[in-house]
């Protein structure tokens, strides 16, 4: 069961780029890295997923170094609506193993 | 794609009562997960189904908890003889698992259970 470690909280001003790093030292060969966003009283929302190098979509980028023992979620030009808890999740969906969410990173965007 | 739907959104009950929650996954998703989330914590895995088969259960799932997915579509989670410690948000997620893909889980907005 791949456990993850993230900073508990981060603050950022509106319009800044935010990078949230997740450590996953015991990631397995077949594991993917997935990031979720969660607002209060809602379920987690998928942001981005990757296996190695860099992945980019319309809302975020995900950077994964060659050893895959960490990953960084990058949110460009954050707005107040990006205030939420962000979780990184490591696991292999094909094997169906459990997924460990950890406590996540609470991001507060300041005007 | 109407998303994962959970019912009810809120449930308040007295200690000792039984409660049942329902989850309707995204259609054609063959895998369904249940999680529990308490305030300030990330979701904790409870159990998951591949089609109608329950393949794994967490130690968190005591014998008072039971989950079913009878036809491989919707799922129910029942808690018998509820206790104060069962108060939490219960989340359901679904995904499609094939032979060579690794699709993310899609979550519902949960059922918030409050035990009086």
Image (cartoon, rainbow, N blue to C red):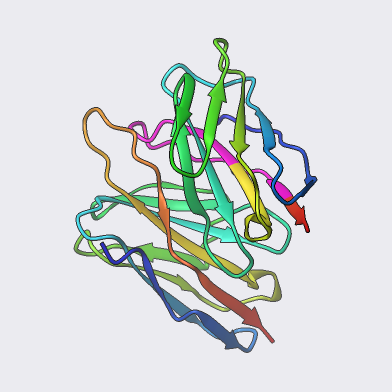
Report the side of A89 relative to B25 (left or right).
right
Residue A93, position as x, y percentages in the image? 38, 35
Residue B47, compared with residue A2, is above or below; it is: below
Residue B21, position as x, y percentages in the image? 43, 75
Residue A55 is a magenta residue:
no
Report the side of A42 relative to B55 (left or right).
right
Residue A47, position as x, y percentages in the image? 49, 45
Q: Quadrant of residue B3?
A: bottom left
Residue B10, position as x, y percentages in the image? 54, 82
Q: Which of B18 and A56 is in front in this view?
A: A56
Q: Nearer the viewer, residue A82 or B43?
A: A82
- For this orientation, the residue located farthest to the front is A15
Residue B87, compared with residue B41, is above or below; it is: below
Q: Quadrant of residue B104?
A: top left
In percent of the image, x 53 and y 56: which residue is there? Answer: A44
Magenta span: chief secondary structure: loop
Quadrant location, the C terminus of chain B: bottom right
Q: Which of B67 and A98 is in front in this view?
A: A98
Residue A93 is a magenta residue:
yes
In percent of the image, x 24 and y 50: which residue is there? Answer: B30
Quadrant location, the N terminus of chain B: bottom left
What span is in magenta? Answer: A88-106
């Amino acid at each position: 069961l791949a456990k993850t470690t993230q900073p508990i909280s981060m603050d950022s001003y509106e319009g800044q780029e935010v990078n949230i790093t997740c450590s996953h030292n015991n990631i397995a060969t077949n594991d993917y890295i997935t990031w979720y966003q969660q607002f209060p009283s809602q379920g987690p929302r998928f942001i981005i997923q990757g296996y190695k190098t860099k992945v980019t979509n319309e809302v975020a980028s995900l950077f994964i170094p060659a050893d895959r023992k960490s990953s960084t979620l990058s949110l460009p030009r954050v707005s107040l609506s990006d205030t939420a808890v962000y979780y990184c999740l490591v696991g292999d969906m094909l094997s169906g193993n459990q997924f460990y969410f950890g406590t996540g990173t609470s991001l507060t965007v300041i005007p | 794609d109407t998303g994962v739907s959970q019912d009810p959104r809120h449930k308040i009950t007295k200690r000792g009562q039984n409660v049942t929650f329902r989850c309707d996954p995204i259609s054609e998703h063959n895998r369904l997960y249940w999680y529990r989330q308490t305030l300030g914590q990330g979701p904790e895995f409870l159990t998951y189904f591949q089609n109608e088969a329950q393949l794994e259960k967490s130690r968190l799932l005591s014998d008072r908890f039971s989950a079913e997915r009878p036809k491989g579509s919707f799922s129910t989670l029942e808690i018998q003889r509820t206790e104060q410690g069962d108060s939490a948000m219960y989340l359901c997620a679904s995904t499609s698992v094939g032979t060579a893909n690794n699709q993310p889980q899609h979550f519902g907005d949960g059922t918030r259970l409050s035990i009086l």
